[in-house]
Image: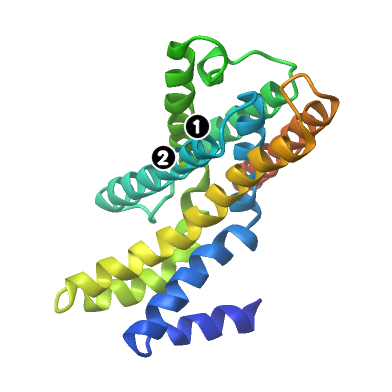
Amino acid sequence: MIELFTGLSGMLTQSDHVALAASFAWGILSIVLSPCHLASIPLIVGFIDKQGKISTARAALLSTLFSSGILITIALIGVLTGLMGRMMGDIGVWGNAAVALLLIAIGLYLMGIVPLPFLDGGIGQPGMRRRGLFAAFLLGLIFGVALGPCTFAYMAPMLGVAFSVASTRPVFAALLVAAYALGHCMVIVLAGTFTELVQHLLRWNEQSRGAAVLKKICGILVIIAGAYMLIGVWRMVRV
């Protein structure tokens, strides 16, 4: 892990093409190697599965809106916390606690234990379908808050290079950030789209036994992510 981090960080200071490829790869790895980011996969998979039978294009759109919401929240938190003189992405102990509890509630929703009407959508009337798109974006905005310092810790090498060249090469700096964002979002979009393809291959719908098992597994994983955050909050309070 340390060798990989060091290798990719070194690539960011090499030629433009190598740096952009490294930033893109680091965006992918920020999902795969981070427990807090990895929770986005069962979250979007469970959400897509909750939508019932939908097209591949709609699954991709929902996943894209979800990942876009994450990126927008991360950008806003970074700017606001930076202006407040806090570490980038640090929303404080109680902010983390609130998001952890919300993740647990969403996990219970995916398991069918508690209702969360603002996340339902995509079934029935056209208005419900529109709400499904908004719910995906809203879910991304909420989950982006949970990522906080975890995201900026993974972005640090790329941001360091981007900031160092921003004054002389603003376009290249923006491309570095965009490459990271593209790699980060691609994993989430592929996960959500793949969920819909599996549904079609197995002929699942929202009432199928396989779909019900998948939603429960995703719910459990999201609850574990929320509990992981709560443990972190408890450790911060004890210090």
CB contact under 8 Å: marks 2 and 1: yes
Instruction: Say which residue appears at 60% left-offset and 24% top-offset.
Output: 51
Q: Quarter of the image containing the N terminus?
A: bottom right
Foreground residue, 80 or 115?
115
Q: For the residue labelled by badge 1, is the local secondary structure a helix, a strand or a loop?
A: helix
Q: Amino acid at mark 1?
A: Leu
Q: Which numbered disc covers residue 223?
A: none
Dividing the picture into quarters, in which one does residue 196 lie?
top right
Dividing the picture into quarters, in which one does residue 98 lie?
top right
Instruction: Say which residue appears at 48% left-offset and 62% top-offset.
Output: 183
Q: Whole-Å distance between the Cαs marked 2 and 1?
A: 7 Å
Q: Amino acid at mark 2?
A: Gly
Residue that mark 1 sits on: 139
Q: Which numbered disc covers residue 69?
A: 2
Whether residue 235 sits left or right of residue 22 in the image: it is: right
User: Can you see residue 234?
Assistant: no
Percent x, y of residue 130: 42, 20
Q: For the residue labelled by badge 2, is the local secondary structure a helix, a strand or a loop?
A: helix
